[in-house]
Amino acid sequence: MTDPIDDVRRLIESRLAEIDAESHRLERAVASMGEGRRPRRRAGSFTGQPSNPKRRSPLKRKSAKRATRGQRRVELLTAIKATPGARPADLAKMIGIPSTQVHALIAKARAEKPIVKRGKGYALKGKP
């Protein structure tokens, strides 16, 4: 009697071999179309060797450029100065960042005391 795990392993290995062979046929077909270059293989494709889990996928999206240190704080204070009493959602739209990030910036600024709560919005300390 054969072990069911061995049977499944054999099935998976044979399917992976079929997929690998098909991949090679498709690469040759693309190369013969005159482009003269082979397509990049996808990360994690079966090569007969275990994949490296620490390696990043080349298909990962690049993130947007990050703001420099203190840039968002300056933008927040400038927006509050321009529109005293503005609510966090309004400030977020003015700056162009998520309102959750504005709330975090406001919490830090209130702890350092350059802004104060005015009604449902915020204003610079000492400004009407």
Image (cartoon, grey):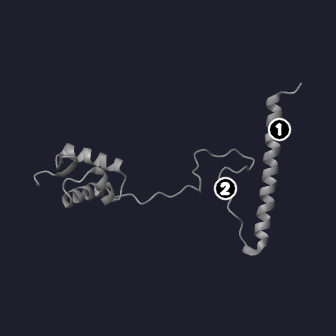
Q: Secondary structure at mark 1?
A: helix
- Which residue is at 75% across, 47% downward? 48
Name the foreground residue: 56 vs 71.
71
Name which residue type carries label 1.
Arg
Name the foreground residue: 54 vs 108.
108
- Which residue is at 21% across, 56% downward? 80
Q: Position of residue 64 (x, y in %)?
A: 44, 59
Mark 2 closeness class: few <14, some 14–19, many ≥20 residues within 10 Å: few
Name the foreground residue: 112 vs 116.
116
Give the CA distance from mark 2 to mark 1: 24 Å
- Which residue is at 36% across, 55% downward? 97
Quadrant containing the C terminus in the rendered view: bottom left
Quadrant containing the N terminus in the rendered view: top right
Q: Secondary structure at mark 2?
A: loop
Q: Is residue 51 above or below residue 64?
A: above
Name which residue type carries label 2.
Arg
Q: Which residue is mark 2?
A: 42
Does 108 sit left or right of 18 as displayed? Answer: left
Q: Which residue is mark 1?
A: 10
- Which residue is at 28% across, 50% downward? 88
Q: Position of residue 98 (x, y in %)?
A: 37, 52
The answer to whether the residue labelled 2 contacts the one labelled 1, judged by CB atoms less than 8 Å apart, is no
Q: Is residue 73 above or below residue 37?
A: above
Mark 1 closeness class: few <14, some 14–19, many ≥20 residues within 10 Å: few
Residue 95 — which label?
A: none
Q: Position of residue 118 (x, y in %)?
A: 17, 48
Does 83 sit left or right of 60 as displayed? Answer: left
Does 22 sit left or right of 84 as displayed? Answer: right
Does 76 sit left or right of 33 as displayed? Answer: left
Q: Position of residue 77 (x, y in %)?
A: 22, 56
